[in-house]
Image (tube, coloured by chain):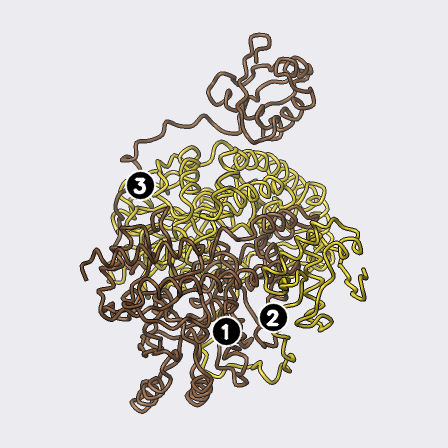
Chain colours: A brown, B yellow
Amino acid sequence: MKAGGFVLVVPEGDAPIFARIAGAVVADIRRGRLRPGDTLPGSRTLAAALGVHRNTVLAAERELALEGWIEATPGGTTRVCATLPESPPRARPAAAATRAESVGFELGPEPPAHVSPAPPGGAIKLLGGLPDLRMVPATALARAYRRVATSRRAHELFGYADPRGDELLRAELAAMLARSRALALEADDLVVTRGSQMALYLTALSVLRPGDRVAVEALGYRPAWSALQAAGAVLEPIPVDAGGLDVERLTERVERAARQGSPFRAVYLTPHHQYPTTAVLGQPRRLALLALARQRRLALFEDDYDHEFHYEGRPVAPLASADPSGQVIYLGTLSKILAPALRVGFVVAPRPLLSRLAALRAVIDRQGDRLVERALRELMTDGELERHARRMRRVYQGRRAALARALEEQLGDVVSFDVPRGGMALWARAPRVDVDRWASACEARGVVLQPGSRFSFTGERVPAVRLGFAAEAEPRLRRAVRLMAEALLGLGR
Amino acid sequence: MKAGGFVLVVPEGDAPIFARIAGAVVADIRRGRLRPGDTLPGSRTLAAALGVHRNTVLAAERELALEGWIEATPGGTTRVCATLPESPPRARPAAAATRAESVGFELGPEPPAHVSPAPPGGAIKLLGGLPDLRMVPATALARAYRRVATSRRAHELFGYADPRGDELLRAELAAMLARSRALALEADDLVVTRGSQMALYLTALSVLRPGDRVAVEALGYRPAWSALQAAGAVLEPIPVDAGGLDVERLTERVERAARQGSPFRAVYLTPHHQYPTTAVLGQPRRLALLALARQRRLALFEDDYDHEFHYEGRPVAPLASADPSGQVIYLGTLSKILAPALRVGFVVAPRPLLSRLAALRAVIDRQGDRLVERALRELMTDGELERHARRMRRVYQGRRAALARALEEQLGDVVSFDVPRGGMALWARAPRVDVDRWASACEARGVVLQPGSRFSFTGERVPAVRLGFAAEAEPRLRRAVRLMAEALLGLGR
């Protein structure tokens, strides 16, 4: 638009018109096309030239005045301020002049990186633990977020807050755990964390001293090992079998270590759906483990990352539900029910431990994102979260069946497996196959799966693959198995 | 509603009607009013009885079928499934039976807690570092969040992601830092963290080894000291004065420690607006500090937590903008510009250090909340963030003046201060007052302020108070100062 020699180009965009007009004026000031002291045309002239209502121009001017770009003159006109809210940007210095490429102080050894590169976009992802993200109730989530962020008392949620997490979310989680896991809880019996990864890290730091011996399942979950090691733990791998953690072997190791004067301090385990095999820890082993923990004063870090997804019978009540002596620290997450990116997990533990966890959390991370926490609480009170979990359980049950059937039909002579009673993945043994080569050949065909070596303690080969069935629809699962069979033929087995 | 002996009570609520109808059916099944095998009335009958469209009833039935509560019979009617998606809840066990009150293993000493209790709701909060949360652009934020969460490719944002933070947000932050801080950056030159607290924790863990000596400002920022100590640092307090960190004293200490064979490894400082005094570190000290760091291979942890809020002249370019040898690790946050609850901060450092930071972050916290990160990026590309920052700078500038004026008028004989050139608080010395008692008396009158002892290294008394002026409007600031004067009279000074 052009008004009395004044030309203003208002860009297209999603922002309201008044904001775009104000932005165009700022851009002109920054470029030097408008200078301190320059007079702007009157609002009527501007409105007519831009083809907008005069109120829109006045709103833009209010914004510009608020930000300190323009001011009213005593004569009733509007001009660019003599002192601008920002100086013209200095010339951007050359990178070499200011950015160092190396550090000017000593660094220790590089920590191990456990984050796998993202698989290519179109690939069929048979990754255990990845929920179907196309089915996340995103609209309900966005609605809840808006409701929270624009509520009358939202300003209270934008500030600093309890490092244990939003109290209403904690109350809702406590009620959910009481309903679904036979855990008698109140809001103060848990701490909200950033997913189960931070839940374990905080737990390990709160309980362990550097050098403490901690038993872990092997095969097992490498990021958990890293969190334990970051807290100074010395890990002792204990084998797993079709019944989960081998508690008899664990007991031998614990007793021997106690005799040798270097006792175990804790056990990290995934008793509900063992990671990666999805085996369920049976009742006799559970009782033996709890007895051992009581006797040897072990802490049990119980990671129940996908509790809801159990298909045969009802979910098994956690170790934490039968723990009068306070051995168990129970870790959970909403990452599998909803979405990993939301980063909401929790720790249930005796309160003396929770107060340490909260103090540590404040040091590491201050607190959670209270708007997201409160929005998730809204999804829970609306029943949306449990509805979604039930829906997904049905969907995953169908996918589990489809994957198992396809494997039997196409690869029945190569792989053997138990249909998992729960979880989001199927553990398929392939004793006569080089599974690492097979996994690479599958990836070349657009199917991403996890070879057993990914879960072994020493990185040695494991003749099995973990096939996640949750993230992909049934036709794609069938297609993946066909491609896996092709890839196997291509290996010239 | 009642249809053929079937009574369904649909609760009020925000959820869509179909979801509430489905919820009412689930509630009846859970209560045992509907039992496995029971037949539901036809959808027309139900719709008529409930006064809703038949499609609404059909949507509710689809939902219930998806979740596994009801199924179609071969005869064309609908009935409650024989096997329900959840078993009736067990009796909630008594707390004593399952919840331990104490832990069944050894715990070390309790870590120090640094989170102050939340001040009472109606209090006037003169807390430095707290922005005005009533002015957060909440509607724009909620709109951006919805746009991100419901976009066609949202499912990609719900999954596991780069622990360095969303790439588009990093690019936008890099551009902002290049524009405003003379830092020549690309997206890969920074890592997004959870606020500056996690930024410092990750930095300390990446750089320091247990026992390393780190210089800190004293007076200073206690949560930062905790983060450094959590990484094993041994802190060495260095005094501050009206010119910020006393670099001459620091140099003496560093040189002496080097001669004694126990060298310093790092310095943590807030050079732009020293915390808590808001003093600006002058140019000669900056040059001397950088030279010392180069010579002694010190890491400088530069915490620039409220860069934007500078009122006299333009903000001072950070140490990181003149650091060709890679001494500086630059920490920032959006907590002060937008809101603490959003927990988005960043670390700018040479890439070899950033890769360690990212690996550590993955162990501690896996990754950020990518939806929030992407929503903030939208606010940045829309120009909303910079607009908001400029707006708030004007507002805070007015509040700074109002507070300074009120202090001079009401307490001019008691306190002395420099009007701060930047920051969100005013540091007022009150040499003849017991400020800890004064702060308590103020709190009793509904004014929360921070006595100097809060910032001292050893907890000793400091005859000064920190008065935050950002969070409260000018009339409330004036009222606060009146109440402070009354409280002082009440002390019988």
Local secondary structure at mark 2: loop
Local secondary structure at mark 3: loop
Chain on which label 1 sits: A
Q: Are marks 1 and 3 in contact (CB under 8 Å)?
A: no
Q: Quadrant of residue B357?
A: bottom left
**Res. B484 in view:** no
Picture coordinates of residue B152 (x, y %)?
A: 50, 42
Residue at horizontal 35 percent and vertical 64 percent from the top: A409
Q: Are marks 2 and 3 in contact (CB under 8 Å)?
A: no
Q: Is residue B447 left or right of residue B422?
A: right
Local secondary structure at mark 1: loop
Q: Quadrant of residue A1?
A: top right
| Other residues around mark 3 within 10 Å, as few (<14) / some (14–19) / many (≥20) | some
Q: In the image, which disc is placed on residue A312?
A: 1
Chain on which label 3 sits: B
Q: Which residue has dot 3 on it?
A: B323
Q: Nearer the viewer, residue B264 or A44?
A: A44
Q: Are marks 2 and 1 in contact (CB under 8 Å)?
A: no
Q: Residue furthest left?
A: A492
Q: Quadrant of the C terminus of chain B?
A: bottom right
Q: Nearer the viewer, residue A389 or B257?
A: A389
Q: Amino acid at mark 2?
A: Leu
Chain on which label 2 sits: B
